[in-house]
Image (spheres, helix red, strand yellow):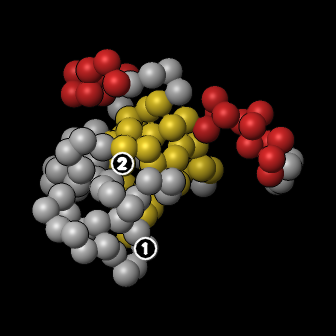
Amino acid sequence: RGQVAGWGRLSAHSQLMSRFLYKLPETILHPSDCQKYHRDMIYEHNFCGGPSQGTGTCQGDSGGPFVYNDKVIGIVSWNIPCATGAPDVFTNIIHHLDFITYYVGNLP
């Protein structure tokens, strides 16, 4: 299990943004499980996380981290519909490591 963090909307039906940083445990899903829900919108640079029923990322959470074993492995990308328990979609940073290293440097 990993954890995602964000400042996004508190629910799919609310315009209220969080005043506090929330974290949510999520399980990394097998790509075929994610494809069942999001069909052909998942690419090799994405992975999905399974939140608990009725939870998940929402508007305002994009760009937030997915942390696994104390390492950031993904960035919140999108979810349709949001915060309903549907699989959250993340960008896998391993596919962008050269870009990140070039612009950020080789940080520990």
Q: Position of residue 65 (x, y in %)?
A: 52, 54
Q: Residue furthest bottom?
A: 19
Mark whose residue sits in front, 2 or 1: 1
Q: Amino acid at mark 1?
A: Leu
Q: Position of residue 9 (x, y in %)?
A: 29, 66
Q: Is residue 101 left or right of residue 67?
A: right
Classify residue 54 by image quadrant.
bottom left
Q: Residue furthest right?
A: 106
Q: Name the residue that disc number 1 marks.
A: 21
Determine the residue positioned at 28% across, 48% down: 51
Determine the residue positioned at 77% across, 33% down: 98
Q: Position of residue 2 (x, y in %)?
A: 45, 49
Helix, strand or loop status at disc 2: strand
Quadrant showing the C terminus: bottom right
Determine the residue positioned at 45% across, 22% down: 43
Q: Which mark is residue 52?
A: none
Helix, strand or loop status at disc 1: loop
Residue 30 shows up from this direction: no
Q: Which mark is residue 26?
A: 2
Q: Is residue 8 above or below residue 106?
A: below
Q: Is residue 15 above or below residue 74?
A: below
Q: Nearer the viewer, residue 40 or 26?
A: 40
Q: Is residue 55 left or right of residue 101?
A: left
Classify residue 34 by image quadrant.
top left
